[in-house]
Image (tube, rainbow, N blue to C red):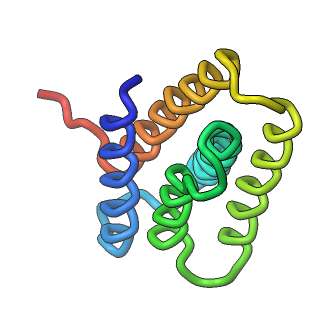
Amino acid sequence: MKQTRFHALLLSALMLSGASAAQSSIPLRGPDYFRDAADLATTLGSAHAIRVRCNGREDQYWRQYMADMLSYEAPDRGNLRSSLVENFNSAYQSVSRQYLQCDNQAVEAEARFARHGQEVSERLAMHYFPKRPD
């Protein structure tokens, strides 16, 4: 599992997008951004449910990434923050009901969620920092 790369990319994307949103050359948040942000919140909630199932409630690994996302992307109360929190919590509850024990299927599902989260993070990063042709 390439969790370290995913985490670095996610944190970089969140920090840079939040910090750079004021620059005029950075694209405004549009429907694609909101779709991806909601998808990422859902993915983090799903992964968190499995992590807690396998390691106990004290393991807040994925939840901390959600907290970081909120601090950069939706630091103030409002519709975006509420929506992201709702997606995270709904996914957490759904996946908690789906995976009742920590077995190979649960571990594999967490890995899938991590890979999907990496893909979504890369899309978000590309939204703010598209690659320039060489």
Q: Is residue 88 left or right of residue 70?
A: right
Residue 35 shows in this picture: no
Q: Is residue 41 left or right of residue 61?
A: right
Q: Residue at x 34, y 63 (%)?
A: 15
Percent position of residue 80, x then y:
67, 68
Number of callouts in the render?
0
Percent position of residue 129, x then y:
30, 48
Residue at the far left: name it.
134
Percent position of residue 16, x then y:
31, 61
Q: Residue at x 45, y 38 (%)?
A: 123
Please name whichever residue, 64 or 121, is drawn nearer the observer in this view of the structure. 64
Task: Reply above or below: 96 against 17.
Answer: above
Q: Quadrant of the N terminus?
A: top left
Q: Quadrant of the C terminus?
A: top left
Percent position of residue 120, x then y:
51, 37
Q: Residue at x 55, y 29 (%)?
A: 116
Q: Residue at x 83, y 32 (%)?
A: 100
Task: Reply above or below: 26 against 48.
Answer: below
Residue at the far bottom: name it.
76
Residue 61 shows in this picture: yes
